[in-house]
Amino acid sequence: MNKMENIYLIGLMGVGKTTIGKQLAKALHRPFYDSDKIIEQSTGTSISTIFSYEGEEGFRIREQSVIAELTALQGIVMATGGGAILKAENREAIKQTGFVVYLYCSIDKILYRTRHDTQRPLLQTANPKQRLQSLLAQREPLYKECANFKIDSGSIPGKTVVKTILQQYRTALDNHERIDS
């Protein structure tokens, strides 16, 4: 399998991984997977319910299994959950099997985008802004470790984000093929 064949989107919740991922998949005529949605479909319940009964660690075990299955596929676009990069196994799987895009945007933009969403267990707190700042401080080094490319998905239109990712992906793919040949 070509190491660059898959595209993975990482970043905090609310940065647009699913929205951008669907558009990328459509542009590339590839299947799109959202690891959180796969978990919900396989368990028949919501992420917040899994968090309630199994805690974050129980959810992360399920997530690792799904990411292992999806990274074994070829020619896909996948949006990961925001915390997928917390497990070293997930970081290695995505780095070894695809082109990794780190989507980011301001905390205020994330708060605006998620203000009515009650299905994000990590934001069910008295101070969601502080929680997001803490999550970003913890996770950003891991996002950067994995990423082939980083783009602000909060300050430019989605179509422009998709176009820019496609340009970066094609450049990386061309360079990778030249190195392998």
Image (tube, helix red, strand yellow):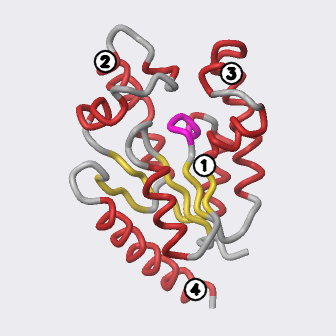
Judging by the rendered image, the residue that carries numbered circle 2 is 130
Q: Quadrant of the N terminus?
A: bottom right
Q: Please identify the quarter of the rendering in which residue 105 is found.
A: top left
Q: Is residue 13 above or below residue 159?
A: above
Which secondary structure, mark 2? helix
Numbered range of the magenta stretch? 81-85
Tell me which residue sits at (60%, 21%) in the image. Answer: 48
Judging by the rendered image, the residue that carries numbered circle 1 is 34
Q: Is residue 2 above or below residue 9?
A: below
Image coordinates for residue 129, horizontal then vertical, percent: 29, 21
Which mark is in front, 2 or 1? 1
Q: Earlier in the sequence, mark 1 or mark 3?
A: 1
Q: Nearer the viewer, residue 38 or 91?
A: 38
Judging by the rendered image, the residue that carries numbered circle 4 is 177
Q: Quadrant of the C terminus?
A: bottom right
How far apart are the two marked residues, 2 and 1, measured between alpha carbons?
26 Å
Instruction: Name the main secondary structure of what is drawn in magenta.
Output: loop
Going by the numbered disc 3, the residue's amino acid type is: Ile
